[in-house]
Image: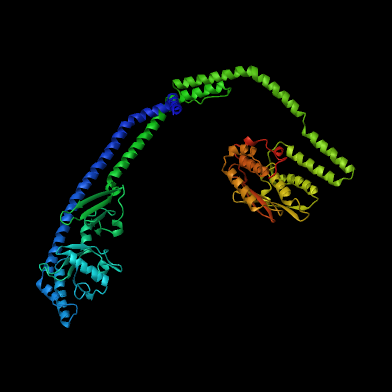
Amino acid sequence: MRRLSARLRDWFRSNIQVRLTCYFLLILLPLVVISLFAIERSRDILYQQAEQRTTVALASTMDYIDLALQNVEELSAVIAADPSIVERLNANGAYLPPTAIVDFSAVLKQLSNLKAVNRFSSQIALYHQASHMLISTSFGGRRVLSEPQQAWLLELARTGGTGVRYMLPQTPVASDATFGEMLGTDTLTLVRSMDLYNTERQFDLLLIAINKNSLQHVLRTLVPSANTRITLLNEQGDVIAASGSDDAAATPLSDEEMEVAFDSEYSMWQLRLVQPKSELYEESDQLRLFTYTIIAISVLLAFVIAWVVYSGIASPLTKLSRGMKQIGSGQLDIRLDNKRRDEFGVLLDAFNQMATEQKHLIEDHYEQQLRMKTTELKFLQSQINPHFLYNTLDSIYWMAKSCDSAEISEMVMQLSRFFRLSLNKGQEEFALEESLSHLHYYIRIQQLRFMDNFTVVYDTAEETKPIPLLKLLLQPLVENAILHGLEGRESGGVLRIASRIQGAELRIGVADNGAGISPERLHYIREELRRMERRSITSLSRDEETATDLFGLRNVYTRMRLYYGEGATMTIDSAAGEGTRIEIAIPLQGGAPTRASYRQKKEGEGSDELDDRRG
């Protein structure tokens, strides 16, 4: 940690631009802090105000719900104490005579009239325990046949007394049904005993289902945004009604949501509102985004202004410092660009003049000696004349002819022609037609070596023949095809060399009908080519030097990329037992291959690299 802090401190002290930028940012720092504090403070105030407004709205709505519950409970008291209803229920026992239909119909009509005057009740029902009849304004009358349900209703009547209880529809009545399934409702239901003021009353029950739609309508009037959830809960925390679906109401509260709750002192129920903070802070978030944008622009301006100041003052000094270091390292040709006319311009002109004079002084002594050494070296190199190789091969050729060794003489002649064209003229490129003629010398040597067990077919388009091609580019591919594909065949081998123009590319293919490549080896070769394609062009030469296999393919691909640029590609297709085909694509521009500007880095790579490399 101390080393890192020391490096940062040294970097800060040695770089004027860094110091200028830090100073400008230091000026902006108080403004940024105050802006961020103001935004966060405004969010807190907005949250508190929203919480207060929501509490007042929930309290008002809860009062309205309590008032509606009081009306329903008063209605239940009126029905439970109505002497005509109680008398008709008590007049009938377990066996219902025909007159019971008249009595129950009268009771049902009376219940329907009472339901019509109270919009918070969706159903009013009576349970006659003696006959197990359930009389309802929704479905008329039906008998409760399930004994567990009968026992549950009897126990509810015995333990309920004269009080009011609210039953949820999901309350289990028996193993085969819930309260909502038994009554045919999906909402909260008020339950109380009939004949309130009679201590010897029968175990009859009054059931009033609360109108769920009315409750949800009241809750929806409080919804301030689309994703806000408002839930009405009983004292046990069970959901009575919600502004959306019950599943959404049961969703756990997250840190990104605001929750406001209000408890009723009358019903002990709770009204809870949950709203995403993103909706609450929507407008303030826009203000925060504007503030962040202003801060980003200010920081960017700080960098720009620091760069402008640096370019005007510190950049000339840095340029002069680098120039002096380069002169100290021996680069005497250094010249600093100078378009200024101020004091820094005068200083840079003086430096250039000093560098020129220094170069002249050194050239007068050291470069004279260097030229002498170079002249001696060229003289020694000129003694190694390529004509010595040609003449020697010609001598071997005529000696073989005199001894009637046709194969040897032809092989030597082809080798002589191959070397003569490889080393002569000092050119890097030959026309494709001339390159194929040169390549045929090598192929003929191999045919003689393998006793003509393969033939060669040239399929070259006419328009491709005058196109210049890098010297010795195809020879490694042909060598691979002969040595790894056709070697071992006694007869019937075919080597095919084809060229065509496709789009803006010159495509040259080398194919054989030899042994082919296994799928695993083919996958490895393709992966290596893709890896080389991802490498930068300047690192391909180093990559080739450290390679342990695929020398021929690597050499061809590296030379293509260095000479023709990243547009040059190589593809390989093969099947075991069927042969192999390699195709190279060279980009064309104006009918000639496009050369890379840095191809000189690979200058001199020719036949000397191809002696022992095989893919």
Residue at position x 13%, y 75% in the image: 90
Q: How many marks?
A: 0
* Residue 274 located left or right of residue 486: left
Q: Nearer the viewer, residue 517 or 341?
A: 517
Horizontally, residue 569 falls left or right of residue 372, namely left
Above or below, comparing residue 195 to residue 434 in the picture: below
The correct choice, above or below, for 240 with respect to 184 in the image is above
Vertical relation: 216 (above or below) 201: above
Place of residue 533 in the rendered image (x, y in percent of width and height, measured from the top left): 58, 44
Q: Position of residue 72 (x, y in %)?
A: 15, 64
Q: Quadrant of residue 430?
A: top right
Q: Is residue 121 visible?
A: no
How far across and how far down the image is residue 487, in percent? 75, 50
Q: Residue 8 vs residue 277: left or right?
A: right
Query: In the depicted view, which residue is nearer to us: 97 or 51?
Result: 97
- The foreground one among 365 and 183 is 183
- Extreme residue toward the front, this view: 200
In terms of image quadrants, where is residue 305?
top left
Which residue is most to the bottom?
98
Q: Quadrant of the C terminus?
A: top right
Q: What kind of colouring is applied to the model shown?
A: rainbow
Give the residue at the far right of this rendering: 403
Residue 506 visible in image: yes
User: x, y percentage for residue 169?
Assistant: 25, 64
The quadrant of the picture occupied by the N terminus is: top left
Residue shown at 22% from the left, 68% from the top: 153
